[in-house]
Amino acid sequence: MNPLQRLRSIKVKFSVVIVAAVAVTLAVNEIGLQLNFAPLFRAGVAAVIALGMVQLMSRGMTSPLREMEKAAASMAAGDVTVRVETSSADEVGRLAVAFNLMAEELAAVDRQRRDLVANVSHELRTPISALRATLENVVDGVVDPDPALLRTMLAQTERLQRLVTQLLDLSRLESGGSPLHLLQFPVADLLEAVADESSLHSPDVSFRVQVEPPDLTVDGDPERLHQVFANLTDNAARFTPDGGEVVLTARPTGDTVTLEVLDEGPGIPSEALGRVFERFYRTDEARSTDEGGSGLGLAIARWVVDLHGGRIRAERRQPTGCRMVVVLPAPDQSITI
């Protein structure tokens, strides 16, 4: 083990090396004087020994830099799995630790990119394959283009359109290209509009809005928050059985406003509660539903809520059902953009 590794400052290490080199030079010179060696010989021996000691002591100081140089070249070539090994506690060692953290983040981004490409390819392939099969059947005369068939084709086309729109939305949100237009507006108006819209899509499910106090307001982008709660409410209606009820509530909670969407569906498995806001993540129940979403709606909802300085989470209801909770800053605590 290099005795300098325990020192936490590279300046101190260099100072130690210089002092040690000078001390060795003086000691060698003193020994040479006692043995009556020639001055030139004493100087040469002292220089060789001092340089050798400096090389030995400084090797551990510069080895992480050499490893980082090699690792950076490997990462530039596309290998994000390389890491730098170091046991030094000085600035170079901390730089190596930061380099490894950066490499971990790049590897995570690379995995997300690969997953995104795979998921987008899958999501696009499914409706495109269905459309192609239907059109081939029509062209071959296997089926007639009756209204039911055309409605099926239209549904697949709309699914493609939703997916592309959501991908563009998510891209703009993640890149910061979708600024918020903040206004103070009544929460009841937002939830009532969402409930009315969802009732048209899901006529077999009832919707109820509870806002206390009725004049409760929030600072936010009305269009973006409408997008969030329309998505949450549509999801709730999709999994609520016919004759069931979806409830939208809002209430002040200290310096925040808490809004909830409650359904009577099967609920989200406990192990999936923390993952439902990931891009393209869907529970088994969603995957088994013919009209399941793309897996992007909740990811977009999380981004929009984050932009508002709020929080969003999913909870299980007892005995059954799901509760989506959105916590936004109260009007006097809201962010400004």
Image: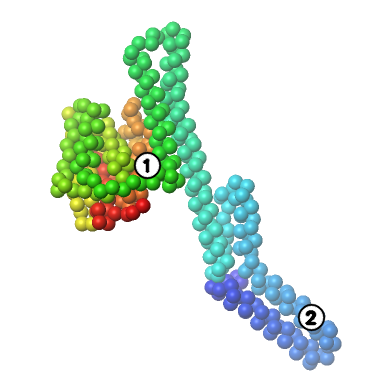
* Residue placed furthest toward the left: 213
Where does residue 56 sit, x and y in percent of width and height? Answer: 68, 72
Q: Position of residue 153 (x, y in %)?
A: 38, 19
Q: Check disc 1 and give the amino acid type.
A: Ala
Locate residue 30 relative to residue 333 in the image: left or right.
right
Residue 58 at x, y percent in the picture:
65, 71
Quadrant for residue 164, please give it.
Answer: top left
Which residue position holds label 2?
Answer: 45
Q: Which corner quadrant of the image does residue 123 belong to?
A: top left
Task: For the residues labelled 1 and 2, say whether their Cβ atoms are less than 8 Å apart.
Answer: no
Dot 1 falls on a residue whose secondary structure is helix
Q: Position of residue 132 (x, y in %)?
A: 46, 19
Q: Nearer the viewer, residue 188 or 290?
A: 188
Would you place residue 27 above or below residue 69 in this image?
A: below
Q: Is residue 88 above or below residue 282?
A: below
Gap between marks 1 and 2, in whole Å? 70 Å
Label 1: how many residues lie within 10 Å, few (<14), some (14-19) or many (20+)? some
Which is more N-terminal, label 2 or label 1? 2
Q: Is residue 329 visible?
A: yes
Q: What residue is pinned by disc 1?
A: 299
